[in-house]
Image (cartoon, coloured by chain):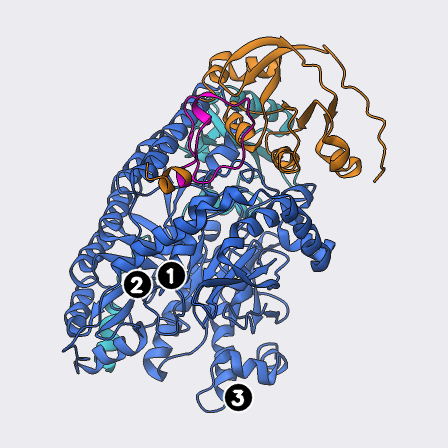
Chain colours: A cyan, B orange, C blue
Amino acid sequence: MARSASAYALAANDLLTGALVFWSQEAGWCSDFTAALFASDPATLEPLGSAEEAANRIVGAALIPVNAAHQPIELRDQRRLQGVTLALRTTASESQQDFAKAA
Amino acid sequence: MSDTLDLQPAEQGAGEGWRLDGDGSFTAAPMPTLDLLLEPEAVQDLGLANLLPLQSIGLVFKTPHDGRSFSLARRLRNAGFDGRLVALGRLMPDQARHAMQSGFDGLWLEQDLVERHNEAAWRAALDVVVARLYSQQRLPASLAGRLAGPDIWQQRSQGQ
Amino acid sequence: MYAYDTFDQTFVDQRAAEFRDQINRRLSGALSEDEFKPLRLQNGLYLQLHAYMLRVAIPYGVLNARQLQMLGDLADRYDKGYGHFTTRQNIQYNWTKLSDVADMIDALASVQMHAIQTSGNCIRNVTTDAYAGVAGDEWLDPRPTAELLRQWSSLHPEFAFLPRKFKIAVLGAAQDRAAMKFHDIGLWAKLDDAGQPIYDIWVGGGQGRTPRVARLFQKAVPLADLLPTLDAMLRVYNLAGRRDNKYKARIKILIDEMGLEPYRAAVAEELGQIDRSVFAPALGEYRRIAAQFETAQRPALQGQKLPQGSPAFQAWLQQNGMAHKVPGYAAIAISLKAKGAIPGDASGAQMRAVAALAERYSASELRVSHRQNLVLPWVKLNDLEELYHALLEQDLAEANIGLASDIIACPGLDYCALATARSIPVAQALSHRLRERERLQGPLDLSLNISGCINACGHHHAANIGILGLNRTETETYQISLGGRADEDAKVGDILGPGFSQDQVPEVIETLIDTWQALRADGEDFATTYARVGKQPFKEAVYV
């Protein structure tokens, strides 16, 4: 467990869609991290993760250690919550026009 | 590697279970009587030649991820072992095909494993599979049904 | 190219049905995730940070227009409108749902494609030269061998649960354009005095956390002995390879620990036990497959001339064109590395557009290169200018094949569950800088590869300039290596020194390029300069 963690959230991938989900304050899975249940004792979340995996609802249950502001401490979790950080499509036009001009 | 072996017969009738044979038949059966039950690590020490005269050998799969016993089966068959070869341990129905096509005559499965995957999955283990490989090594004589018969390359070469 | 007969089609149809059944059993709970994992991986299905990722096989990088069109359709229908071509000549979709995968596999089977063994601890998709069959320096078309190996290894019952993944590459030319010496087994096909195929077998190459250049296992193995030898090599590995530590489970570690000579002896002993009659049909099979590729070869064309065209056209042809073994044709690479692009990504619309161009200008044939680009292998010289303009319209005429801006990058921490740092944003930032530099200074003759973790899917070890993304105290840090190369003189790069922040990387790379340009002899490429001067001047320039 991360030494500086104030609390933990439980994350997983949805079995059917693979989408990133969190154990919510409503005792179900949600896609909004701010709605996640934060527990100071990881032992309260770990059995939940195992039970939900066994019930074939999710895959890859893992704890996310967070700071006092409920921000993830670990880089991998930070990036995962951030989502894909790049523009998905890039046009080549600009570059090709540059070269056409230069040529 | 020793020249002579003090082979301990495998524990007999140690548990209830099921046998899956090369023709796809799936029946309740006690653990088979085998001359030797081997985990993959042990084979190197025993020496292949010492195993060839045996009538029956069981090879254990410790986890579904460990494929060594498939190669051990093939090595035994290549060396001329023509006794009964049984796969035991933590196999999945999806690996039944691999076992038979690697040279096993059949599988013996403990009750809990059969229940885990449910009986129907084991009964269907040889139904929804790719039955004809491109290149198939020598199969045990006991193999019948979907998995028996010439491979794709043989069929092509015979103009079938 | 190779076309399925009813046996091949039945094989992929049965496999599609088998995987659909496995998915259904997973969803019903009959298969646990631990059990399903090796089964889904053997069918190319990963679970990544945000979704399932499906990797589709493009055997030895060869596909036809209809197949590329289907890949584009799948991108639009089941993904977010794009796909990612990989360094092993496959394509992967980053946003698939488990509930859709069986339908995707059925759609692939309808165009003679599949996802068999694109992942998992089994024999992976066999790769080769993207210019196979058309390269001027080729002495034997490696594709029949690759197809023979595809068939032999597909659903191999004994080698489906190996200690680790197993990658094979085949070459048949003087130049290595497939990073053959970074494969578990590399085959360098040649011809004997009677004109029959023989193979130099290399073993134990690989990248990852313990990079190794393959070592010569045996020279001049005749075709008749090829499959028995591979069978014996794999069996010894399956039985003796380490299973206690996945980072030490590749065959390169077995060779390190066992020694090459004892490994050779073990394989020889195994070979002595093999029933060779099993492999006898392989010779006829090879001839049957080779005949299909030979039929698809085109005769020399008369009256074809290299067009003059604009200077921009000439620059594109110079950079992206390749001399063809058949007079009258050129092989043309389509760069997926435009300024700021995501290396290897193509949209569904682009895939369909390229498929249409292949149909019109390249006998409906395409290739995927290990540098994550596409190749049109059969373009008539008289069609080149028209093709160039058609590519321009599709934003696909970037003239940077083999240059610094032709960056290899893995998906990194934007997608990958194993990654320790992002690689695509680094590639995009560098691409802007380097493409601009190439515009001002002309071609930058060096390779630059980026991996987002030590597993090295972005081939950083094998690049002239390699970048490895690491997590240092929860911060993305990038370690630079120099002097690696993936060609026939393969070499693992040397680590330059302490790593840099993401913001620093572009400046550091430019400093390294400045240093090379100051040190290089006339016309010298980066690798040659580095081999001559070593690491020190670069280190001094960067760590001031």
Residue type, mark 3 in image: Leu
Task: Give the chain letter at badge 3.
Answer: C
| Bounds of the magenta segment | B127-153
Task: Give the chain letter at badge 2.
Answer: C
Q: Which residue is mark 1?
A: C369
Q: Is residue C501 visible?
A: no
Observer-nearest residue: C459 or C179?
A: C179
C128 is higher (above) or lower (below) than B37? below
What number is the disc on residue C163?
A: none
Residue type, mark 2 in image: Val
Q: Quadrant of the C terminus of chain C?
A: bottom right
Q: Circle 2 — which element? A: strand
Residue type, mark 1 in image: Ser
User: Residue B33: x percent and y percent?
Assistant: 71, 14
Count residues near mark 2 (Cα–Cα under 10 Å), then give few for <14, some for 14-19, many for 20+.
many
Reply yes or no: does residue B139 show up in magenta. yes
Q: Is residue A96 visible?
A: yes
Observer-nearest residue: C63 or C518?
A: C63
Observer-nearest residue: C193 or B33?
A: C193
Q: Circle 1 — which element? A: loop
Reply yes or no: does residue B143 show up in magenta. yes
Q: Nearer the observer, disc 1 or disc 3? A: 1
What residue appears at the point 69 percent right and 49 percent down from the top-left corner?
C269
Mark 3 and mark 1 in contact (Cβ < 8 Å)?
A: no
Taking the image as shown, residue B10 lies to the left or right of residue C272, namely right
Q: Which residue is mark 3?
A: C519
Q: Which residue is mark 2?
A: C375
